[in-house]
Image (cartoon, rainbow, N blue to C red):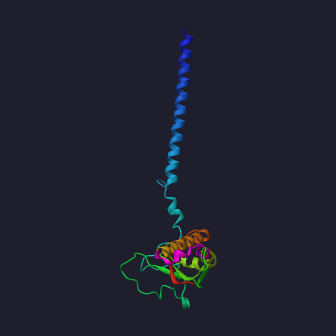
């Protein structure tokens, strides 16, 4: 009879120790996973976004110097010759890029041709302007495809021209994202618009 209680007591003690060890391991795993999640999301241990720095060209406020401003004549920045900006209106300055040549294309399901010259605007730093110049050939190809896919009826209405401008803006940004990882073009503007 003395052996039986000793075996039962010894068996319960082993089960309790195993239960305590498993509980401790489980709590460590849960706690470690929680800490990992907090670090990964940046809630503790610093933010990963701060390590990477800003993504893409930055917005440039009026009056700020654009470190990427394209160079003008005689080594001056293009901003040096710019007009004085007003205090009202947009918070950010707007820079423009004009494509060097006109775009001429047929229209979808029509014998008519369209000839237009366009410019783009950006509120981002000068890298966008540099990328527009660098990738002008790829952008030209996309814009010509859009013009060729435009119905003739669209070019005679203000709403149709607005849709065309938005399609061009989207296409130009897609080319820049594909080539440089960032778009940055806010709008496309018609400088000339002739239908024949």
146 magenta-colored: yes
Residue at x 57%, y 71% (from the top left corner): 171
Which of 71 and 107 lies nearest the eye of the viewer?
Answer: 107
Which of 13 and 126 lies nearest the eye of the viewer?
Answer: 126
Work out which residue is located at the far top of the displayed protein and give it: 1
Q: Is residue 27 above or below residue 146?
A: above
* Magenta stretch bounds: 143-158
Total marks in image:
0
184 magenta-colored: no
Q: Can residue 124 be seen in this view?
A: no
Position in image of residue 104 (x %, y %): 60, 82
Position in image of residue 53 (x %, y %): 52, 66
Which image quarter is the C terminus in? bottom right
Work out which residue is located at the far left of the displayed protein and give it: 88
Residue at x 51%, y 85% (from the top left corner): 78
Position in image of residue 137 (x %, y %): 64, 78
Q: Can residue 3 be seen in this view?
A: yes
Q: Is the magenta stretch mostly helix, strand or loop?
A: helix
Which image quarter is the N terminus in? top right
Which of 102 and 105 lies nearest the eye of the viewer?
Answer: 105
Residue at x 41%, y 86% (from the top left corner): 84
Q: In which quarter of the image is residue 117?
A: bottom right
Position in image of residue 114 (x %, y %): 57, 81
Which of 174 and 166 lies nearest the eye of the viewer?
Answer: 166
Q: In this view, does 23 lie above or below 103?
A: above
């Amino acid at each position: 009879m003395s052996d039986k209680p000793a075996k039962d007591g010894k068996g319960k003690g082993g089960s309790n120790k195993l239960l305590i060890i498993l509980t401790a391991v489980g709590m460590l795993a849960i706690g470690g996973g929680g800490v990992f999640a907090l670090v990964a999301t940046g809630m503790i241990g610093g933010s990963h976004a701060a390590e990477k720095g800003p993504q893409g060209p930055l917005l440039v406020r009026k009056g700020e110097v654009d470190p990427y401003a394209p160079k003008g004549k005689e080594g001056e920045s293009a901003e040096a010759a710019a007009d004085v900006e007003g205090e009202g209106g947009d918070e950010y300055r707007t820079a423009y890029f004009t494509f060097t040549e006109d775009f001429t294309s047929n229209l979808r399901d029509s014998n008519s041709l369209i000839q237009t010259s366009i410019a783009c605007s950006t509120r981002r730093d000068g890298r966008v302007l540099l990328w527009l110049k660098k990738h002008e050939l790829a952008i030209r190809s996309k814009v010509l495809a859009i013009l060729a896919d435009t119905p003739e009826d669209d070019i005679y209405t203000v709403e149709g021209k607005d849709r065309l401008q938005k399609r061009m803006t989207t296409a130009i940004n897609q080319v820049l994202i594909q080539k440089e990882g960032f778009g940055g073009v806010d709008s496309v503007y018609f400088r000339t618009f002739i239908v024949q």
